[in-house]
Structure formats: C-alpha cells, structure tokens
Image (spheres, rainbow, N blue to C red):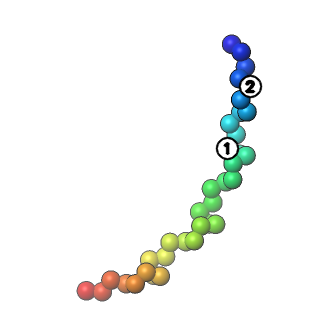
Amino acid sequence: MSTFNLPTFQPSNLPTFQPSNLPTFQPSNLPTHEY
C-alpha cells in the first residue's frame, strides 16, 4: 500500500482543550431563582 502524502493527524499539535482557560460556569453569577 502506498503511504499517504497527507500530514499525519497529531492531536498534540492542536491547541490542548483546557476548560480552565474558559470562563468557569458559576451559577452563583446567575440571578438566583427564588420562589
């Protein structure tokens, strides 16, 4: 089989997904729903 000329897919090259970089979801910031 011929080797593919396409660049090997390396997730390590992609920017690592770090939830810490995203704004933390804090329900406390939302207006508390009070009955």
Amino acid type at image mark 2 = Asn
Q: Which residue is mark 2?
A: 5
Query: Extreme front residue here?
Result: 5
Secondary element at image label 1: helix
Above or below for 18 versus 5: below
Secondary element at image label 2: loop
Quadrant in the rendering for residue 10 = top right
How far across and down, in percent of the image, does residue 28 sit? 45, 81
Q: Quadrant of the N terminus?
A: top right
Q: Which residue is mark 1?
A: 11
Above or below for 6 versus 17: above
Look at 37% across and 84% down and name the residue there: 32
Gap in angstroms between the C-alphas marked 2 and 1: 18 Å
On the picture, is 25 further left or further right than 17?
left
Quadrant in the rendering for residue 5 = top right
Look at 69% across and 53% down and name the residue there: 15
Above or below for 1 versus 4: above
Q: Earlier in the sequence, mark 2 or mark 1?
A: 2
Above or below for 9 versus 2: below
Q: Quadrant of the C terminus?
A: bottom left
Amino acid type at image mark 1 = Pro
